[in-house]
Image (spheres, grey):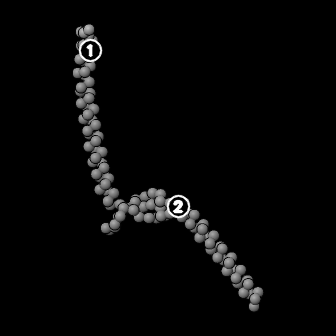
Amino acid sequence: MSASPLLQTLEEELGVNMLPQRDALQRRFLYFQTKYREYQEQFLALRQCYLQIECAWCKTHIGWKRKTAAVPGETSHGICPPCATDILRKIQAAKRRGHAERATVYARMTQAA
């Protein structure tokens, strides 16, 4: 059961035509792989010059800040806007409670006198 000469010719032509495409795809893949490695090295080099800033309360990423001196570590801490709002509300509430408590103590002192 041999294949017809026409079928054999088509298979040979397709195989021959696919080899240059395969080679082109391999070259393209190697090019992108090389570029990826170059960018990865550049990123790692740049990352050494920056600190990652994260919120000290919720640990969310806030941004990057350029290192000004030889600072150990890769992370610094700040506070994100939602956490800052929450903390300020708690401080204001504590101040109001403190004023109310002081006013009550003062009222008691003036009544006793």
Crowd around label 1: few <14 · some 14–19 · many ≥20 (10 Å)? few
Instruction: Please identify the quadrant where the N terminus is shown.
Output: top left
In the depicted structure, whether residue 44 falls above or below residue 5: below
Q: Quadrant of residue 31?
A: top left
In the image, taking residue 13 as reference, residue 97 lies left or right, namely right
The answer to the question of whether label 1 and label 2 lie on touching residues, with beta carbons closer than 8 A, is: no
**Would you say 27 lies left or right of 105 here?**
left
Q: Amino acid at mark 2?
A: Pro
Which mark is first along the chain, 2 or 1? 1
Q: Quadrant of residue 90?
A: bottom right
Amino acid on which disc 1 is placed: Leu
Q: Which mark is residue 77?
A: none
Q: Which residue has dot 1 on it?
A: 10
Identity of the residue drawn at 70% across and 84% down: 106
Residue 26 placement: quadrant: top left
Residue at 34%, 67% (x, y): give it. Answer: 71
Which numbered disc covers residue 81? 2
